[in-house]
């Protein structure tokens, strides 16, 4: 039976055509590296040569409809722009023949290969030709499509992708662990170092916007939506548009390409990004597998965080305040651009629910949200006028600041006490002497092995002396640990310059209540039914340690 006769048998009969409308499919991916045989030019030349050859041998006409070229894309899924365009042309009957260099060009996924070769192409009467690995022609040699070589090559191609994916992930994870930036685009506010693509430099124009966002949110009490509207009204390009404006081929599937406006979600991402502290934070998302490219969030504990890898844009204090505000209920009326002074701070002392702000005439009032929504059967009003609340809270904060200032003076007095100084000097001298002994014993222990190798001491002496020095080192370590604990107990880990104390003392002359003051010093304000208020201040633990230190040491003689 000749080749022409074989073409008319079995499944091939349904493919008989007077003309073959050819789709030349070419794919080059990053995983192919610099392999010249896989270049677009080489693949195209090989296929064109084959077409010219069969034209002289076959009676049918061969016409190339189009070249479908996916450059730089993986073959592990079929969501490739040109591959999908080819499929649409098949469904429109524009194409009835596909020619590829080898099976790895259209498929690196074993399951996809089976679907298209065994179902989709036969369903649409498409002739499939692979020139290599292995040679296939579903029209002239239909039996080749049933060869065991086809699924075996599919497994090999699939496994190649799996192994490549593992190796690439290992390299990327190593770079992440070293604080090297591996992203395609720098975070908004930064740019890649032109001399080292794994380093970030501050982009001053965008960084100024980042600083404004934090200042407006933390210090001016603006909501995220209000910040987004202000930036948009100022004509400030959103991060995606800014990247494109600077010549980067950036696309965000979650936003319209032409949209330059800001959103509250974009503002939120900037306010939560620790990269602006100067730290490299990577690996916050991952693809499900080398085949399934859907991205999923990674738990924060599994992020790659390397500190102090680039110049910070935001201070740690400002960043911490922003994170504290995220956890608060700061809802405002739709027309309100800025947050109310107490937004997110007020709670009913009985039901613990947030207080609701209402306005009567020119006065603002707060009432228990539970009472407002469920009537008096659930909770009582706990009503308090905003003006009275401002006065009371300011007074209580001023008293707390005075108290902390007095504590700082007392701590300084205790630390300057002769008794404390004598004890401190004794501990310091002891630590210094024990450290010297530790270093000497370590040197002697390290020299034992060389002495044994040189024949200066016997094996028995080496083992005995090694055990002796190890015991001595352990005892010295325990002694130094005890001395440090004694030193810690003496000073209680407290000094007049302790950050807790300074947070309050710097507001010593405060005359007016503002949101920045509340954010820094106050955790929650509880409103009681009789209009009494209780303030839960921040830094409760260091405050407790400072009080305990003063109580324990206040009777030291001057």
Image (tube, grey):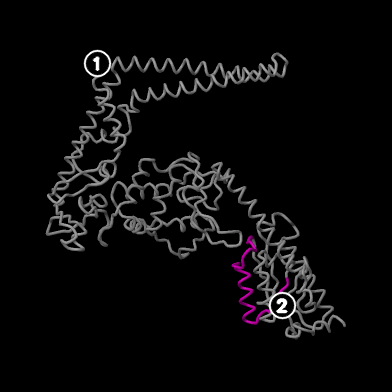
Along the viewing direction, whichever of 247 and 318 lies nearer the viewer? 318
Residue under the point 32% across and 30% down = 498
Percent position of residue 216, x then y: 32, 49
Q: Residues within 10 Å of mark 1 (few under 14, many from 20)?
A: few
Percent position of residue 316, x then y: 39, 40
Q: Disc 1 versus disc 2: distance between alpha carbons?
A: 99 Å
Quarter-of-image position of residue 419: top left
Q: Residues within 10 Å of mark 2 (few under 14, many from 20)?
A: many
Along the viewing direction, whichever of 1 and 309 lies nearer the viewer? 1
Q: Tell me which label, 1 or 2, sits earlier in the chain.
A: 2
Q: The C terminus appears in which quarter of the rendering? A: top left
- Which residue, given by chain and number where applicable, does mark 1 sit on? 557
- Which residue, given by chain and number where applicable, does mark 2 sit on? 97
- Whether residue 76 sits left or right of residue 247 in the image: it is right
Along the viewing direction, whichever of 450 and 393 lies nearer the viewer? 450
The relative height of residue 131 versus residue 309 in the rendered view (above or below) is: below
Percent position of residue 114, x then y: 68, 71
Question: Is 84 within the magenta?
Answer: yes
Quarter-of-image position of residue 149: bottom right
Q: Which residues fall within the magenta stretch?
A: 72-99
């Amino acid at each position: 039976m000749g080749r022409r006769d074989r073409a008319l048998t079995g499944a091939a009969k349904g493919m008989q055509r007077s003309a073959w409308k050819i789709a030349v499919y070419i794919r080059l991916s990053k995983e192919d590296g610099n392999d010249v045989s896989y270049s677009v030019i080489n693949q195209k030349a090989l296929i064109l040569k084959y077409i010219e050859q069969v034209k002289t041998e076959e009676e049918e006409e061969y016409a190339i409809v189009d070249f479908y070229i996916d450059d730089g894309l993986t073959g592990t899924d079929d969501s490739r722009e040109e591959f999908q365009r080819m499929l649409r042309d098949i469904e429109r009957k524009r194409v009835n023949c596909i020619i590829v260099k080898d099976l790895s060009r259209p498929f690196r996924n074993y399951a996809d290969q089976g679907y298209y070769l065994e179902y989709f192409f036969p369903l649409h009467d498409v002739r499939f030709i692979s020139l290599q690995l292995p040679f296939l022609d579903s029209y002239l040699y239909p039996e080749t499509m049933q060869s065991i070589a086809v699924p075996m090559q599919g497994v090999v191609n699939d496994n190649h992708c799996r192994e490549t994916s593992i190796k690439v992930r290992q390299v990327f994870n190593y770079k992440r662990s070293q604080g090297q930036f591996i992203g395609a685009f720098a975070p908004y506010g930064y740019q890649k170092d032109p001399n080292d693509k794994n380093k970030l430099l501050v982009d001053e124009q965008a960084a100024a916007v980042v600083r404004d966002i934090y200042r407006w949110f933390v210090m001016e009490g603006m909501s995220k939506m209000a910040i987004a509207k202000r930036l948009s009204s100022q004509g400030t390009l959103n991060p995606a548009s800014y990247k494109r404006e600077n010549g980067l081929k950036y696309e965000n599937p979650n936003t319209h390409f032409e949209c330059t406006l800001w959103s509250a979600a974009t503002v939120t991402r900037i306010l939560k990004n620790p990269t602006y502290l100067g730290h490299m934070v990577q690996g916050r998302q991952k693809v499900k597998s080398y085949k399934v490219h859907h991205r999923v969030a990674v738990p924060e504990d599994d992020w790659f965080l390397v500190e102090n890898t680039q110049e910070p844009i935001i201070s740690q204090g400002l960043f911490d305040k922003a994170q504290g505000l995220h956890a608060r209920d700061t809802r405002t009326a739709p027309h309100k651009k800025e947050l109310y002074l107490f937004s997110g701070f007020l709670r009913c002392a009985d039901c613990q629910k947030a207080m609701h702000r209402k306005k009567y005439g020119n006065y603002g009032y707060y009432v228990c949200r539970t009472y407002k929504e469920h009537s008096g059967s659930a909770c009582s009003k706990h009503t308090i006028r905003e003006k009275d609340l401002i006065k009371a809270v300011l007074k209580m904060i001023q008293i707390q600041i005075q108290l902390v200032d007095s504590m700082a003076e007392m701590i300084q007095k205790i630390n300057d006490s002769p008794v404390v100084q004598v004890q401190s000097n004794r501990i310091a001298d002891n630590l210094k002497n024990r450290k010297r002994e530790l270093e000497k014993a370590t040197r002697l222990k390290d020299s034992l092995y060389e002495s044994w190798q040189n024949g200066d001491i016997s094996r028995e002496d080496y083992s005995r002396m090694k055990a002796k020095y190890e015991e001595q080192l352990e005892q010295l370590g325990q002694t130094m640990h005890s001395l440090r604990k004694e030193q810690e107990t003496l000073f209680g880990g407290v000094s007049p310059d302790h950050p807790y104390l300074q947070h309050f003392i710097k507001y010593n002359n405060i005359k007016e209540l503002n949101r920045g003051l509340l954010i820094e010093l106050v955790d929650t304000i509880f409103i009681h039914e009789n209009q009494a208020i209780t303030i839960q201040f921040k830094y409760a633990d260091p405050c407790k340690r400072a009080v305990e230190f003063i109580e324990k040491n206040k009777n030291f003689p001057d």
